[in-house]
Image (cartoon, rainbow, N blue to C red):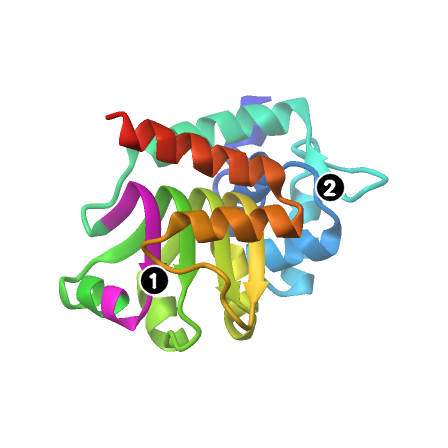
Amino acid sequence: MLDRVFEALSHEVRRRIIEVLGVRGELPYSELLRATGVESSTLSFHLKRLQGIVIRTNQGYSLTALGKRAWSILSFSLSRKEAPELLIQGERIELWIDDALLESAYKRGKKLAVRNVAIVGIDRGTSTSLMRRVLVEIRDVLVAYVPKNLFSELQPLLFGVMAIIPYTKLNWKLGYPLTAVEDLKKRGYVRVAEEIEKRLKKDRNT
């Protein structure tokens, strides 16, 4: 049984599939394809190799009990193995991602990981080539404002994001998190807005 787990974890694409399903839960094939960022033929091939780890359901694909064990091993490994060149931006209310931030990390020889931020916004003019070289993930975020022109590039990097808002015109102003709260409530993301308000209250009390 463990041999099957280690076989599943031995390939980068299979690890990616397990991670996506572990973080996001059951997904239809089209969503899994976008999230893994591989070709359809590649995804199909590796899904066949993941029998017993991943199961096909009426709604798409999800992890089996053995798959959840594989995800537990993988997530522990990811939490312990932080590459020395990784620059982590996190533990804050807001973060704006643009060329200036990415260039700063690139010049220092760093990859950028965004984790545990309430509100993340990505500038519409961000260079896709720079983003591909530097940005590795946006994880455990309450809301990510993603420009429509960069959505396909960014979606495979999003993990554990409660609300993903594709935008043409941004309704959140950096430095004014309550504008995001108001915007989310108008869009129907009341729970996400309430979580941001909780973080703001906690931040004021510390």
In the rendered image, the vertical position of residue 82 relative to residue 205, given as above or below: below
| Number of other residues with Cα within 10 Å of mark 1, as a class: few under 14, some 14 to 19, many 20 or more | some
Instruction: Return the residue found at the far left.
Output: 108
Amino acid carrying mark 1 in the image: Ile
- Is disc 1 in contact with disc 2, using a CB cutoff of under 8 Å? no
Horizontal and vertical percent position of residue 172: 45, 59
Q: Circle 2: is it few (<14), some (14-19), or many (20+) Cα within 10 Å?
A: many
Q: Which residue is mark 2?
A: 61
- Asked whether 95 falls inside the magenta stretch, the response is yes
Q: Secondary structure at mark 1?
A: strand
Specify start and end residues of the magenta stretch as a single range: 87-101
Q: Main secondary structure of the magenta part?
A: strand
The structure residue drawn at horizontal position 38% and vertical position 68%, both measured from the top left corner, is 132
Seen at 17% across and 62% down, the residue is: 109
Residue 41 magenta: no
At which x and y percent is residue 17?
Answer: 58, 45
Q: Amino acid at mark 2?
A: Tyr
Left or right, 172 with reference to 192: left
Task: Determine the residue positioned at 36% across, 43% down.
Answer: 115
* Residue 91 in picture, x, y percent from top left: 30, 38
Tell me the element at label 2: strand
Image quarter in which the C terminus is found: top left
Q: Which residue is mark 1?
A: 97
Q: Quadrant of the N terminus?
A: top right
Residue 11 in view: no
Q: Nearer the viewer, mark 1 or mark 2?
A: 1
Label of residue 46 in the image: none
What is the quadrant of residue 55 in the picture? top right
Identify whether 101 is placed above or below 161: below
